[in-house]
Image (cartoon, rainbow, N blue to C red):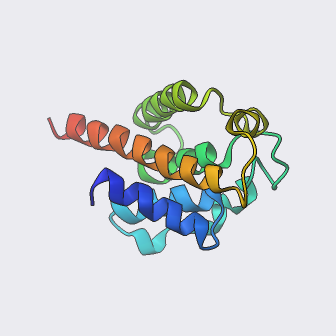
């Protein structure tokens, strides 16, 4: 799947009923996980709309991406290495802030301005998915070399 397809898939997931955090995490897992059917998308549900739909705290599109990275590269045992997951999340955070100005939902909403049915958030979720996809492709190519 191409980056544009992933962005559209995340947008469509968000448009059709998943929230921001669910849409990005499900899209990334669907594309990058060996066993996407095993991903519990509900782990992202509490992060919808700036945590619990408060539109105050950390952006759901960002946290959904972080959840996906944890699923793909996180550790399942104490003492295992965190470097890959941490490096990917740090780069995602850097690029996210560069593109959207913050990881804070309220600040992002303010920058996006007036919108109907959170359409700009849905578009942002798509763009964040493409951004994370690029980072993951680059990380996987480094692991293979």
Q: Residue at x 70, y 56 (%)?
A: 118
Residue 87 percent location from the top left of the image:
44, 29
Q: Residue at x 27, y 55 (%)?
A: 2
The correct choice, above or below, for 36 with respect to 110 in the image is below
Quadrant for the N terminus, please: bottom left
Question: Nearest the camera: 122 or 32?
Answer: 122
Say whether residue 75 is visible.
no
Question: Nearest the camera: 12 or 21?
Answer: 12
**Quadrant of residue 111 in the image?**
top right
Total marks shown come to 0
The correct choice, above or below, for 54 with respect to 87 in the image is below
- What residue occupies the far left of the structure in this picture? 145
In the image, is 79 to the left or to the right of 119? Answer: left
**Quadrant of residue 37 in the image?**
bottom left
Residue 134 percent location from the top left of the image:
34, 41
Residue 89 percent location from the top left of the image:
50, 35
The correct choice, above or below, for 42 with respect to 61 in the image is below
Quadrant for the C terminus, please: top left
The correct choice, above or below, for 70 with respect to 46 in the image is above
Say whether residue 107 is visible.
yes
Q: Residue at x 78, y 49 (%)?
A: 51
Residue 50 percent location from the top left of the image:
75, 47
Question: Nearest the camera: 78 or 86?
Answer: 86
């Amino acid at each position: 799947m191409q980056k544009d397809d992933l962005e559209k898939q995340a947008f469509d997931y968000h448009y059709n009923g998943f929230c921001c955090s669910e849409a990005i995490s499900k899209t990334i897992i669907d594309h990058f996980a060996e066993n996407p059917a095993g991903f519990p998308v509900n782990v992202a549900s509490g992060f919808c709309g700036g945590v619990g739909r408060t539109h105050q705290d950390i952006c759901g599109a960002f946290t959904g991406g972080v959840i996906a990275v944890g699923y793909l590269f996180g550790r399942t045992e104490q003492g295992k290495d965190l470097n890959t997951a941490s490096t990917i999340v740090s780069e995602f955070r850097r690029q996210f802030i560069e593109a959207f100005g913050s990881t804070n939902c309220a600040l992002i909403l303010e920058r996006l301005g007036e919108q109907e049915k959170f359409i700009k958030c849905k578009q942002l979720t798509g763009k964040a998915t493409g951004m994370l996809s690029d980072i993951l492709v680059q990380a996987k190519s480094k692991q293979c070399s």
